């Protein structure tokens, strides 16, 4: 028996009974809050085609994705995020549904992060997606729901991080940054690296 057969891979963990109980309690409280706020639960595949994430939507770089090849030679990835698969699903299987569309999920995501070897490569992501309510009204609904869900789960001392892709693109254009320099700066912003 090798030494590796006695340990979990780097970046993942076992949950012992009490840890598992607490994790599930938090997930259920958040899911209940989302549901009571009019959001419907969806469950997405654990892996997707790499092409789903090559659309430029989202901030996960290809190097951070955990990849494998299926029997047909297609490159697949363990989902690094759930927002992009939600976009895929709503633009195909839900394309005839009238907005607003309110969806929520609580599921594991997977990412090989390069900032620290101690960071989790498998983590639980809980969130909502609100489609068809543009502007400040939709933003306010989602932010208020995030705060309510965290509080309902008994979490305290949290902070809310609001990202705005169009704002970042505008700053990059105004500064004249393109190509590798813009990608490098985007990486620092994604990792909250203040240099």
Image (tube, rainbow, N blue to C red):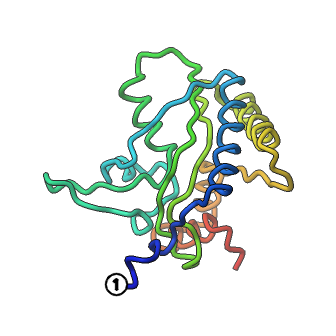
- Residue at point 79% right, 35% down? 144
The image quarter containing residue 64 is bottom left
Q: Does dot 1 land on a helix, a strand or a loop?
A: loop
Rendered position, 70 above or below 105: below
Residue farthest along the left direction in this orientation? 72
Indicate the position of residue 183 as horizontal and vertical percent values.
Answer: 50, 68
Task: Name the residue beneath numbered marker 1.
Answer: 2
> Considering depth in this image, is 153 or 76 the residue closer to the camera?
153
Indicate the position of residue 97 as horizontal and vertical percent values.
Answer: 46, 16
Q: Is residue 37 left or right of residue 8?
A: right
Residue farthest along the bottom direction in this orientation? 3
- The quadrant the C terminus occupies is bottom right
- Residue at point 62% right, 53% down? 20
Q: Is residue 125 left or right of residue 81?
A: right
> Considering depth in this image, is 59 or 72 the residue closer to the camera?
72
- Residue at point 61% right, 44% down? 126
The image quarter containing residue 96 is top left
């Amino acid at each position: 028996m090798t030494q590796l057969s006695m340990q979990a891979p780097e970046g993942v963990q076992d949950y012992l009974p009490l840890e598992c109980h607490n994790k599930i309690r938090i997930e259920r409280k958040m899911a209940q809050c989302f549901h009571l706020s009019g959001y419907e639960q969806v469950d997405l595949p654990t892996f997707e085609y790499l092409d789903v994430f090559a659309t430029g939507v989202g901030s996960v770089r290809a190097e951070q994705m955990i990849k494998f090849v299926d029997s047909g030679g297609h490159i697949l990835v363990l989902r690094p995020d759930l927002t992009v698969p939600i976009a895929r699903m709503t633009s195909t299987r839900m394309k005839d549904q009238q907005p607003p569309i309110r969806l929520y999920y609580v599921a594991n995501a997977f990412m090989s992060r390069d900032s620290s070897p101690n960071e989790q490569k498998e983590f639980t992501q809980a969130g909502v997606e609100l489609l068809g309510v543009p502007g400040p009204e939709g933003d306010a609904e989602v932010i208020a729901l995030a705060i309510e869900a965290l509080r309902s789960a008994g979490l305290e001392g949290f902070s809310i991080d609001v990202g705005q892709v169009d704002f970042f693109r505008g700053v990059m254009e105004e500064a004249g940054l393109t190509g590798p320099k813009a990608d490098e700066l985007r990486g620092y912003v994604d990792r909250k690296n203040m240099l």
